[in-house]
Image (spheres, rainbow, N blue to C red):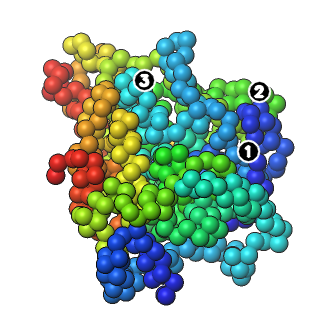
Amino acid sequence: MKSFSFEQPATVQAAAASLATHADAKFIAGGTNLLDLMKLEIEAPTHLIDINRLGLDQIETTDDGGVRIGAMVRNSDLAAHSRIRIDYAVLSRALLSGASGQLRNKATTGGNLLQRTRCYYFYDTARPCNKRVAGSGCSAVAGFNRMHAILGASDQCIAVHPSDMAVAMRLLDAEVETINGSGVRRVIPIAEFHRLPATTPHLETNLRRDEMITGVKLPAPLPGRQTYRKVRDRASYAFALISVAAVIDASGERAQSARIALGGVAHKPWRVESAELGLSGATINVKSIDAVTDQLLAGARAYSDNDFKLALVRRTVHAAVAEILKNSPQWK
Amino acid sequence: MISNLNIIDEGAEFFEISRRNMLKVSAAMFSAPLAERVMSASPPAPSGVRSRDLTQPARTHPPVMLPVALNVNGRQFDVRIDSRTTLLDALRETLAMKGSKKGCDHGQCGACTVLLGGRRINACLTLAVMHDGEPITTIEGLSNGNPLHPMQAAFLKHDGFQCGYCTPGQICSAIGMLDEAQRGVPSHVTENLSVAAVPLTQQEIRERMSGNLCRCSAYPNIVAAIGDAAGVSP
Ligand SMILES: Cc1cc2nc3c(=O)[nH]c(=O)nc-3n(C[C@H](O)[C@H](O)[C@H](O)COP(=O)(O)OP(=O)(O)OC[C@H]3O[C@@H](n4cnc5c(N)ncnc54)[C@H](O)[C@@H]3O)c2cc1C
Ligand code: SF4
Ligand code: FES
Ligand code: FES
């Protein structure tokens, strides 16, 4: 690990100002991703700003009936919060399917969103990786790419965003709240927060260099039932091969509305709003789900070892919908 | 090699003497290769810096030494340490409390699990300087050996280990886990999220303990021990 100076500011403003004044500074929240990478010198900040003593650890109800989640709320506390469990169950489920009990006790809301989009070649410093060393090449495109993207990738990088939480937040239309060193605040819709790799795979989000995440806002709860289905190589403590977050309001004869987001398929959580229109006001059956999945997978391309993900997405979307609609007359 | 065996032996320190001698034998017979593997699981050197000794900081970045008050097992230790020191290395190397183990050093195995303000965390993925004044409990702080902490006694009763290397982490994790379950924290296998009290079944224990790997695969006995300590019928 490269050495670094260290500070523990007491206010959000001081922390943000410090980030703006130190060239190679980074915030450290739970540290579970940053230290993992600093040990390999893949991340090498020369100054660390510990944001664990700023507060930002509350979950509050907002005026419009939604919630604001402080950036430092731990993944375990967020998953266990009564409002989240009842009104945003998909988020609780996604969080509980990620990492381990110990890691969730440390991992934070802001840190989880900002964990690096990565693959095992990114960790292997003996191998080329455009994300780690610009222009060095991507070891995964022609390498072992079982975990990799099938949507939105480029020949520069085919890594997937590893977060389960972010997939649920994408489904829920969360908004990321930030502040910069001059005190200017900004709200970034989650759809615009993470980036596709294109020709700049080292840029993973649209957060600016001098910005700090202060919290995440969720709009008022959605009607209907929610689920998060994660498919992985082990039953627990493994990253997703793919995951499906879904909410369907099928209280009447037909679906009133439906949303579907995918994890493990792209450099960011994947959602195609126009595809979901095919489910609102429609009878939900195998045919209509297949049609929606076709649109979700439009333009998909697999890289050999991950060919299976195309079929796995389709089957898991069906399984998620079936789980939501079980015991309901709509499901035929 | 010798030092690896010592470390394993220390892991067994909180068990009764006969057990300890037996562990020494079994460690020597079966577990040394594991220990060697575990201890040597350091990451490969980054390609661009292979010629440099990575244990030495680069000259452009001299070490930054900082004061920190570590509050471990009810005692305060005022130390000056390199900012890079993980909590795990501070416990093991600076304070010479070698009960907490280093398996992977990357948050993947749980051997380093300690309790921070009563909550279980991986000591390898946090910095000592981040925890100035915060109460930390390690395996050494659970009991003075007589009597054992109920979780230690349950591991002994159910033979919840073989080499013992993962055991301090398993025990600290299990204690933190039971507290989570008592506070109603749900898990991936909890069927109904809308009830406040989560019944702790065998399946719940297995899922909640998945952050602690056991290379000897003592899992059935570990689950039995935790279930016993938690009052779950098998
Ligand atoms: C073994 C292992 C298994 C895992 N399995 C899973 C899994 O199955 N599913 C999953 O989703 N995740 C998994 N993870 C990843 C884990 O969820 C992340 O490491 C964690 O969420 C990161 O949060 P943190 O607070 O520790 O971030 P940190 O490591 O503290 O920070 C990460 C990055 O975010 C920046 N940052 C942090 N907070 C802010 C802020 N408020 N404003 C601006 N920048 C900020 C930091 O500077 C850093 O660059 C796993 C991790 C490990 C080690
Ligand atoms: S997929 Fe991305 S992260 Fe993985 S090797 Fe290629 S460039 Fe690097
Ligand atoms: S040493 Fe493996 S999780 Fe910390
Ligand atoms: S008892 Fe040997 S690793 Fe668990």
Please name the residue that numbered disc 1 is placed on.
Answer: A8
**Quadrant of the image occupied by residue A238:** bottom left
Please name the residue that numbered disc 3 is placed on.
Answer: A83
**In the rendered structure, which amino acid carries the disc numbered 1?**
Gln
Which one is in front in this view, the residue at disc 1 or the one at disc 3? 1
Please name the residue that numbered disc 2 is placed on.
Answer: A184
Q: Position of residue A49 (x, y in %)?
A: 73, 46
Image mark 2: chain = A
> Who comes first in sequence, dot 1 or dot 3?
1
**Quadrant of the image occupied by residue A226:** top left
Q: Residue at x 43, y 78 (%)?
A: B9
How much space separates mark 1 and mark 2, taking CA atoms?
Answer: 22 Å
Q: Position of residue A110 (x, y in %)?
A: 59, 39
Q: Is residue B57 left or right of residue A202?
A: right
> Who comes first in sequence, dot 3 or dot 2?
3
Q: Secondary structure at mark 3?
A: helix
Q: Position of residue A227 (x, y in %)?
A: 32, 32
Confirm whether residue B46 shows in the render.
yes
Q: Residue at x 61, y 47 (%)?
A: B134
Crowd band around label 2 with a 10 angstrom C-alpha radius: few (<14), some (14–19), many (20+): few
The verdict on a common chain for dots 3 and 2 is yes
Front residue of A310/A45: it is A45
